[in-house]
Image (tube, helix red, strand yellow):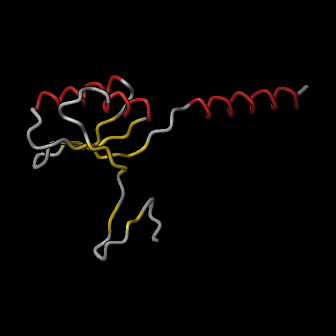
């Protein structure tokens, strides 16, 4: 009986862990002529879809975020005039080597 209960609890825990949406760190930028209202709209849509804004840039039109693929697709399809560039966030070293999750190439 105890084994059955432990097995059931393990199965429930495993299923709930799989149900969590995977979020990835991204940088979303817009062309210079994009109005601030478009960037603000993208931020709002991303938050409504469960994403988290980690930084808003001042020198360029854009922001960094953690979001699911569905949230990123919602931002990508907002409009056809000001198309965002969505890139996975990663660290770049001074010699040009891209570091992902602390691993060097």
Name the residue rendered at 63%, 29% in the picture. 16
Q: Determine the residue located farthest toward the top in the rendered image.
A: 48
**Residue 96 placement (x, y as % from top left):** 31, 72
Name the residue rendered at 75%, 30% in the picture. 11
Of residues 84 and 58, the one drawn nearer to the viewer in this rendering: 84
The quarter of the rendered structure image containing the N terminus is: top right
Name the residue rendered at 11%, 46% in the picture. 58
**Number of marks in the image?**
0
**Residue 93 placement (x, y as % from top left):** 32, 70
The image shows residue 95, relative to residue 102, as above or below, that is below
The answer to whether 26 appears left or right of 41 in the picture is right
Q: Determine the residue located farthest toward the bottom in the rendered image.
A: 95
* Quarter of the view holding residue 37: top left
Name the residue rendered at 46%, 71% in the picture. 105
Of residues 73 and 67, the one drawn nearer to the viewer in this rendering: 73
The image shows residue 42, relative to residue 96, as above or below, that is above
Of residues 34 and 103, the one drawn nearer to the viewer in this rendering: 34
**Residue 42 placement (x, y as % from top left):** 24, 29
The image shows residue 80, relative to residue 93, as above or below, that is above
* Quarter of the view holding residue 94: bottom left
**Residue 40 placement (x, y as % from top left):** 18, 29
* Quarter of the view holding residue 68: top left
The answer to whether 100 appears left or right of 53 in the picture is right
Q: Determine the residue located farthest toward the right in the rendered image.
A: 1
């Amino acid at each position: 009986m105890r084994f059955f209960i432990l097995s059931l609890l393990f199965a429930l825990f495993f299923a709930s862990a799989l149900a969590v949406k995977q979020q990835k760190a991204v940088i979303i930028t817009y062309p210079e002529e994009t109005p601030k209202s478009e960037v603000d709209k993208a931020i709002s849509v991303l938050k409504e879809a469960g994403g988290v804004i980690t930084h808003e840039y001042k020198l360029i039109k854009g922001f960094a975020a953690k979001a699911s693929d569905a949230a990123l697709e919602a931002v990508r399809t907002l409009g056809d005039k000001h198309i965002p560039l969505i890139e996975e966030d990663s660290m770049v070293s001074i010699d040009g080597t891209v570091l992902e999750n602390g691993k060097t190439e």
